[in-house]
Image (cartoon, helix red, strand yellow):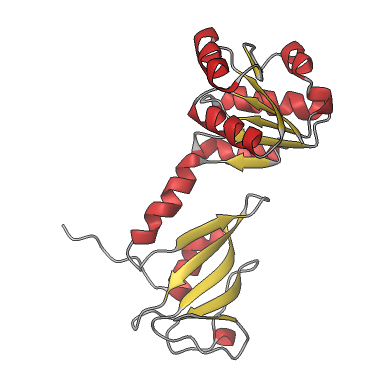
Amino acid sequence: MFIIVVGGGKVGYYLTRELLTSGHEVVLLEKDPRRAAQIADEIGSVVLNRDGCEGKHLAAAGANRAAIVAAVTGDDEDNLVVCQMAKHHFDVPRTIARVNSNKNEELFRQLGVDEVINPTRMALGAIEQDIPVHDLLHLAQLSTGDMELVEAQIEADSPAAGRVARDLVMPEGCILFVVIRGDVVQTVRPDTSIQPGDKLVALSRTDCQDEVRHILIGERAETPA
Protein backbone atom coordinates (compact mmCIF):
# COMPACT_ATOMS: atom_id res chain seq x y z
CA MET A 1 0.00 0.00 0.00
CA PHE A 2 0.94 3.64 -0.40
CA ILE A 3 0.83 5.34 3.00
CA ILE A 4 1.48 8.94 4.01
CA VAL A 5 2.70 9.53 7.57
CA VAL A 6 2.48 13.08 8.93
CA GLY A 7 4.74 13.86 11.87
CA GLY A 8 8.37 12.85 12.27
CA GLY A 9 8.50 12.44 16.03
CA LYS A 10 9.36 9.08 17.57
CA VAL A 11 5.97 7.62 16.65
CA GLY A 12 6.17 8.75 13.03
CA TYR A 13 9.80 7.74 12.69
CA TYR A 14 9.36 4.19 13.96
CA LEU A 15 6.05 3.77 12.14
CA THR A 16 7.66 4.78 8.85
CA ARG A 17 10.61 2.46 9.42
CA GLU A 18 8.36 -0.51 10.16
CA LEU A 19 6.14 0.18 7.16
CA LEU A 20 9.15 0.37 4.87
CA THR A 21 10.51 -2.87 6.31
CA SER A 22 7.14 -4.49 5.59
CA GLY A 23 7.42 -3.51 1.94
CA HIS A 24 4.95 -0.62 1.83
CA GLU A 25 5.46 2.56 -0.15
CA VAL A 26 5.68 5.41 2.37
CA VAL A 27 6.11 9.18 2.39
CA LEU A 28 6.81 10.93 5.70
CA LEU A 29 6.01 14.64 6.04
CA GLU A 30 7.88 16.53 8.78
CA LYS A 31 7.73 20.31 8.97
CA ASP A 32 10.81 20.84 11.13
CA PRO A 33 13.78 21.03 8.72
CA ARG A 34 16.38 19.74 11.15
CA ARG A 35 14.25 16.78 12.22
CA ALA A 36 13.37 16.02 8.58
CA ALA A 37 17.05 16.07 7.61
CA GLN A 38 17.96 13.83 10.55
CA ILE A 39 15.35 11.22 9.60
CA ALA A 40 16.25 11.44 5.90
CA ASP A 41 19.86 10.61 6.77
CA GLU A 42 18.62 7.39 8.36
CA ILE A 43 15.80 6.20 6.12
CA GLY A 44 16.31 8.06 2.86
CA SER A 45 14.38 10.24 0.47
CA VAL A 46 10.90 9.15 1.60
CA VAL A 47 11.08 12.10 4.02
CA LEU A 48 9.78 15.46 2.84
CA ASN A 49 10.32 18.68 4.80
CA ARG A 50 6.70 19.81 4.45
CA ASP A 51 3.80 20.78 6.70
CA GLY A 52 1.17 18.05 6.28
CA CYS A 53 -1.54 20.44 7.46
CA GLU A 54 -1.35 22.23 4.13
CA GLY A 55 -3.29 20.74 1.26
CA LYS A 56 -0.68 21.58 -1.34
CA HIS A 57 1.92 19.54 0.52
CA LEU A 58 -0.41 16.58 0.94
CA ALA A 59 -1.12 16.81 -2.77
CA ALA A 60 2.59 16.92 -3.60
CA ALA A 61 3.13 13.85 -1.42
CA GLY A 62 0.53 11.96 -3.48
CA ALA A 63 -2.50 12.01 -1.18
CA ASN A 64 -4.81 11.49 -4.14
CA ARG A 65 -3.53 7.91 -4.47
CA ALA A 66 -2.82 7.12 -0.81
CA ALA A 67 -4.58 4.15 0.78
CA ILE A 68 -3.93 5.48 4.29
CA VAL A 69 -2.96 8.80 5.83
CA ALA A 70 -1.67 8.54 9.40
CA ALA A 71 -1.37 11.81 11.35
CA VAL A 72 0.83 11.18 14.38
CA THR A 73 2.17 14.57 15.38
CA GLY A 74 2.14 15.71 19.00
CA ASP A 75 -0.60 18.24 18.27
CA ASP A 76 -4.21 17.02 18.25
CA GLU A 77 -5.45 19.96 16.18
CA ASP A 78 -2.86 19.31 13.48
CA ASN A 79 -3.73 15.61 13.40
CA LEU A 80 -7.42 16.38 13.01
CA VAL A 81 -6.80 18.91 10.22
CA VAL A 82 -4.63 16.42 8.33
CA CYS A 83 -7.25 13.66 8.56
CA GLN A 84 -10.11 15.94 7.60
CA MET A 85 -8.22 17.20 4.58
CA ALA A 86 -7.17 13.69 3.54
CA LYS A 87 -10.71 12.36 3.84
CA HIS A 88 -12.70 15.22 2.33
CA HIS A 89 -10.30 16.74 -0.22
CA PHE A 90 -8.36 13.71 -1.40
CA ASP A 91 -10.87 10.89 -0.75
CA VAL A 92 -8.31 8.84 1.17
CA PRO A 93 -10.06 5.57 2.11
CA ARG A 94 -8.61 5.31 5.62
CA THR A 95 -7.35 7.93 8.06
CA ILE A 96 -5.54 7.28 11.34
CA ALA A 97 -4.92 9.93 13.98
CA ARG A 98 -2.93 10.02 17.17
CA VAL A 99 -4.87 11.77 19.92
CA ASN A 100 -2.99 13.03 22.95
CA SER A 101 -5.90 14.32 25.02
CA ASN A 102 -8.64 11.92 26.12
CA LYS A 103 -11.28 14.64 25.78
CA ASN A 104 -10.60 14.87 22.03
CA GLU A 105 -11.00 11.17 21.28
CA GLU A 106 -14.76 11.16 20.77
CA LEU A 107 -14.60 14.39 18.73
CA PHE A 108 -12.15 12.78 16.31
CA ARG A 109 -14.51 9.84 15.83
CA GLN A 110 -17.53 12.08 15.32
CA LEU A 111 -15.66 14.04 12.66
CA GLY A 112 -14.95 10.91 10.65
CA VAL A 113 -11.43 9.84 11.58
CA ASP A 114 -11.42 6.11 10.86
CA GLU A 115 -9.00 5.02 13.56
CA VAL A 116 -8.01 6.93 16.71
CA ILE A 117 -4.83 5.92 18.55
CA ASN A 118 -4.71 7.15 22.14
CA PRO A 119 -1.31 6.44 23.80
CA THR A 120 -2.72 7.55 27.16
CA ARG A 121 -5.54 5.03 27.00
CA MET A 122 -3.14 2.30 25.83
CA ALA A 123 -0.81 2.98 28.75
CA LEU A 124 -3.76 3.03 31.14
CA GLY A 125 -4.89 -0.35 29.84
CA ALA A 126 -1.47 -1.77 30.66
CA ILE A 127 -1.42 -0.18 34.11
CA GLU A 128 -4.93 -1.43 34.86
CA GLN A 129 -3.57 -4.98 34.82
CA ASP A 130 -2.40 -4.20 38.37
CA ILE A 131 -5.48 -2.27 39.52
CA PRO A 132 -7.29 -3.94 42.46
CA VAL A 133 -10.16 -6.27 41.58
CA HIS A 134 -12.82 -3.80 42.72
CA ASP A 135 -12.57 -1.99 39.39
CA LEU A 136 -13.30 -2.87 35.77
CA LEU A 137 -10.40 -3.65 33.48
CA HIS A 138 -10.74 -1.92 30.10
CA LEU A 139 -9.69 -4.35 27.40
CA ALA A 140 -10.56 -2.60 24.13
CA GLN A 141 -12.65 0.21 22.70
CA LEU A 142 -14.70 -0.55 19.61
CA SER A 143 -14.44 1.68 16.57
CA THR A 144 -17.84 3.24 17.28
CA GLY A 145 -16.24 4.93 20.29
CA ASP A 146 -19.12 4.40 22.74
CA MET A 147 -18.67 0.65 23.34
CA GLU A 148 -15.89 -1.14 25.19
CA LEU A 149 -14.91 -4.64 26.15
CA VAL A 150 -14.42 -4.70 29.93
CA GLU A 151 -13.40 -7.42 32.35
CA ALA A 152 -14.68 -7.92 35.89
CA GLN A 153 -12.90 -10.10 38.44
CA ILE A 154 -15.50 -11.91 40.55
CA GLU A 155 -14.64 -12.34 44.22
CA ALA A 156 -16.51 -14.19 46.98
CA ASP A 157 -18.16 -10.95 48.10
CA SER A 158 -19.07 -9.78 44.58
CA PRO A 159 -22.84 -9.37 44.00
CA ALA A 160 -22.62 -11.64 40.94
CA ALA A 161 -20.93 -14.52 42.79
CA GLY A 162 -23.12 -17.60 43.09
CA ARG A 163 -25.76 -16.31 40.69
CA VAL A 164 -26.67 -17.38 37.17
CA ALA A 165 -26.31 -15.03 34.24
CA ARG A 166 -30.08 -14.71 33.62
CA ASP A 167 -30.50 -13.19 37.11
CA LEU A 168 -28.05 -10.38 36.40
CA VAL A 169 -30.10 -7.53 34.96
CA MET A 170 -27.62 -5.64 32.80
CA PRO A 171 -28.22 -2.11 31.48
CA GLU A 172 -29.61 -1.80 27.97
CA GLY A 173 -26.87 -2.26 25.40
CA CYS A 174 -24.57 -4.08 27.84
CA ILE A 175 -24.03 -7.82 27.30
CA LEU A 176 -22.11 -10.47 29.22
CA PHE A 177 -19.83 -11.99 26.63
CA VAL A 178 -17.54 -14.71 28.02
CA VAL A 179 -16.51 -16.17 31.38
CA ILE A 180 -12.89 -17.12 31.99
CA ARG A 181 -12.49 -19.84 34.62
CA GLY A 182 -8.87 -20.83 35.02
CA ASP A 183 -7.64 -21.72 31.55
CA VAL A 184 -11.14 -22.33 30.19
CA VAL A 185 -13.04 -19.67 28.22
CA GLN A 186 -16.80 -20.17 27.81
CA THR A 187 -19.55 -18.16 26.19
CA VAL A 188 -21.95 -16.78 28.80
CA ARG A 189 -25.37 -18.44 28.49
CA PRO A 190 -28.54 -17.69 30.49
CA ASP A 191 -27.87 -20.66 32.78
CA THR A 192 -24.14 -19.97 33.24
CA SER A 193 -23.28 -19.98 36.94
CA ILE A 194 -20.95 -17.20 38.06
CA GLN A 195 -18.37 -18.36 40.60
CA PRO A 196 -15.73 -16.61 42.75
CA GLY A 197 -12.47 -16.47 40.81
CA ASP A 198 -14.25 -16.09 37.46
CA LYS A 199 -13.39 -13.29 35.09
CA LEU A 200 -16.40 -11.93 33.22
CA VAL A 201 -15.88 -10.13 29.92
CA ALA A 202 -18.73 -7.82 28.95
CA LEU A 203 -19.54 -5.57 26.02
CA SER A 204 -20.56 -2.32 27.67
CA ARG A 205 -21.54 1.21 26.73
CA THR A 206 -19.08 3.67 28.24
CA ASP A 207 -21.88 5.64 29.89
CA CYS A 208 -23.18 2.69 31.92
CA GLN A 209 -19.95 1.19 33.21
CA ASP A 210 -20.52 2.41 36.75
CA GLU A 211 -23.75 0.41 36.77
CA VAL A 212 -22.01 -2.63 35.27
CA ARG A 213 -19.34 -2.40 37.97
CA HIS A 214 -22.02 -2.21 40.67
CA ILE A 215 -23.85 -5.29 39.32
CA LEU A 216 -20.78 -7.48 38.83
CA ILE A 217 -18.25 -6.31 41.40
CA GLY A 218 -20.06 -4.12 43.92
CA GLU A 219 -19.15 -0.77 45.30
CA ARG A 220 -15.61 0.45 44.85
CA ALA A 221 -13.56 -0.21 47.96
CA GLU A 222 -12.52 2.81 49.98
CA THR A 223 -8.86 3.77 49.79
CA PRO A 224 -7.22 3.58 53.23
CA ALA A 225 -6.33 6.96 54.71
Question: Looking at this view, is 108 or 1 the one in front?
Answer: 1
Where does the image place residue 75, in percent across and percent down from the top left? 53, 24
Most extreme residue toward the top is 33
Residue 206 shows in this picture: no
Tell me: residue 138, above or below residue 166: above
Most extreme residue toward the left is 225
Question: Looking at this view, is 153 or 37 the one in front?
Answer: 37
Tell me: residue 58, above or below residue 118: above
Determine the image quadrant of residue 87: top right
Q: Residue at x 72, y 13 (%)?
A: 57
Where does the image place residue 164, in percent across and percent down from the top left? 53, 89
What quarter of the picture does the N terminus occupy?
Answer: top right
Q: How many marks?
A: 0
Question: Looking at this view, is 73 or 33 the one in front?
Answer: 33
Tell me: residue 173, above or below residue 70: below
Q: Residue at x 50, y 9 (%)?
A: 34
What quarter of the picture does the C terminus occupy?
Answer: bottom left
Determine the image quadrant of residue 7: top right
Determine the image quadrant of residue 64: top right
Where does the image place residue 98, in percent across and percent down from the top left? 57, 34
Q: Residue at x 66, y 17 (%)?
A: 53
Q: Is 213 on the left-hand or right-hand side of 186?
A: left
Tell me: residue 20, above or below residue 209: above
Q: Is 179 on the left-hand or right-hand side of 123?
A: right
Residue 116 shows in this picture: yes
Where does the image place residue 46, in percent across and percent down from the top left? 66, 20
Q: Is 185 on the left-hand or right-hand side of 113?
A: left
